Amino acid sequence: MPGPRARQAFAPTGVGRLNAPRPALVEAGFDGAPRLVNRQLVALVREEWRVVDRWWTEEPVDRRYFEVVLESGQNVCVYRDREEGCWFTQNA
Amino acid sequence: MIACLLIPGFELRAALRTRPRLALVPAALAPDVGEEQLLGPVTSTAEAAGVKPGMRLGESLATCPDLVLVERDPGAVEREWEEVLRRLEDAGFAVDPVEHGVVVFETRGVERLYGGVQPALERALAAAGSAWDPRIGAAGRRFTALAAASVARPGQILIVAEKEEKSFLEPLPLSLLPLTNERYAELEGLGVRRIGELAQLPGGAVAERLGVDGRQAWRLVRGGRKAKVRGRKPAAELAEALVFPDAIGNELTLRRALGSLLERLLARPERAGRPFRKLALVARLVDGGSWRRAVTLRDATAELPRLRLALGPKLQELPAPILELRLEATELAEHRGQQLALVEPAGEEAAGRLREGLRQVRASTGSGSVCSIVEVAPWSRIPETRALVVPRDV
């Protein structure tokens, strides 16, 4: 069995995307707005917007973004991917 | 087609080259000094006695009291591995070494030379040498080639056709994937033990539960991307050695020996005036093991005082008196010198230093480690499509 370095090296490399979305643990309220982000309570939802794009391709984008302030004072941008049905964080 | 040549337990095999008798008894590679007390690769006799690679030292000695611990020999490992790679390169393969015992290469360039994929791979097996028990896996993608090599028997060539890749990967264990132990445990807790079981899960759910690593592993089990193999630039064949009649541990003598080696290396005509980018100090220890340290220079240089300054402190890390000291020039810079200007344009010096720093990072961490950001669609509403991170040649 090859070592961990070898296994890591077989992971895809080369050109990458900057600011790629990272999966986030989000608990949403009844209105769909996040209440908990990565186990931290949301103090304020500052802004909300939708991005619907590429609907004519095989990889359509349908996201509902929220810019929130956590209890710790941290500003975070999260979105719910309506195609995959899960949450991500990303600098919008 | 991409092929992966695998030699399991290469470090132990290389360390046993001078003591072949130990290959027939329960033996294992001892843990490194200062590292966690976990065993390295083990011989087949030790495996039959219940000792496994990665086992705790105490547990393994309790399981098999006759277990012989073999000292690590990084010098021999590096030398033997370099010889395997050179033999493959002599046979016409542009190799991309991954770690000791694992190398990847493309067969496309040599298929016509040898009359097909199978004969080309047979040539690669022969070039590696049957004494190492090499095995080869070949497929359209790197990950599948590695998986095929991992399940092949010694001396076997396992070729996976593109349309069979999915069914081939499905029954294989998850341990082939680049995941941490916690992630394996998490997946096992969820009842996912095979690559096929992970591939069936929805990508979004895997990403949400296991994060970035999980998503990457999921992409791999679904085939991964088709990436090209870039052959390595062969290492420079410049080395000088000093053999001492008695074991030497005195720092002053060691520094003098280093100075002498540096002078001899600098005088080698093969250098053709090029400065050194990366050097390695190798020593044969009095107790039979070896020691190796590689040094990447911040500025490629051929100045003796600067080379002494860079390499001298490494001698203090020697764990025992030595019988032989060897200095290898692993990489030479491509330029022969720097053209100085009477009046340098503003910012030229800073830009030059930055370039040199990036070259140093690239030499020490490998290609693909220095990247630049290229804006492709700054107006896009989708943030991750605005810019790409592209590997950069410096």
Image: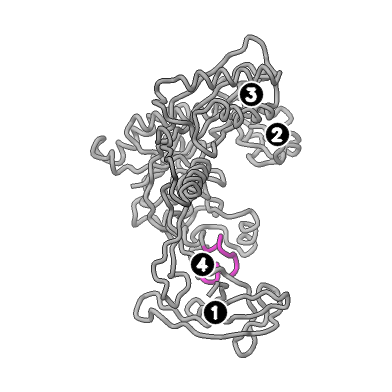
Is label 4 in a helix, a strand or a loop? loop
Q: Amino acid at mark 3?
A: Gly
Q: Say whether disc 3 or disc 2 marks the residue closer to the N-terminus.
A: 2
- Measuring from the top left, give residue B62's x and y in whole percent: 76, 35
Residue at which label 1 appears: A80
Up-down relation of residue B367 to residue B213 (above or below): above
Tell me which chain the residue with mark 2 is part of: B
Residue B212 falls inside the magenta stretch:
yes
- Measuring from the top left, give residue B355's x and y in whole percent: 47, 47
Question: Are discs 2 and 1 both within one chain?
Answer: no
> Neighbour class for label 1 at 10 Å: few (<14), some, many (≥20)?
many
Is label 2 in a helix, a strand or a loop? loop
Mark number displayed over residue B289: 3
Q: Label 2 to label 1, Cα distance in Å?
A: 48 Å
Task: Provide the major secondary structure of the magenta segment.
Answer: helix
Residue at which label 2 appears: B33
Q: Mark 4, mark 2: which one is toward the viewer? A: 4
Q: Label 4 to label 1, Cα distance in Å?
A: 16 Å
Question: Are discs 4 and 1 both within one chain?
Answer: yes
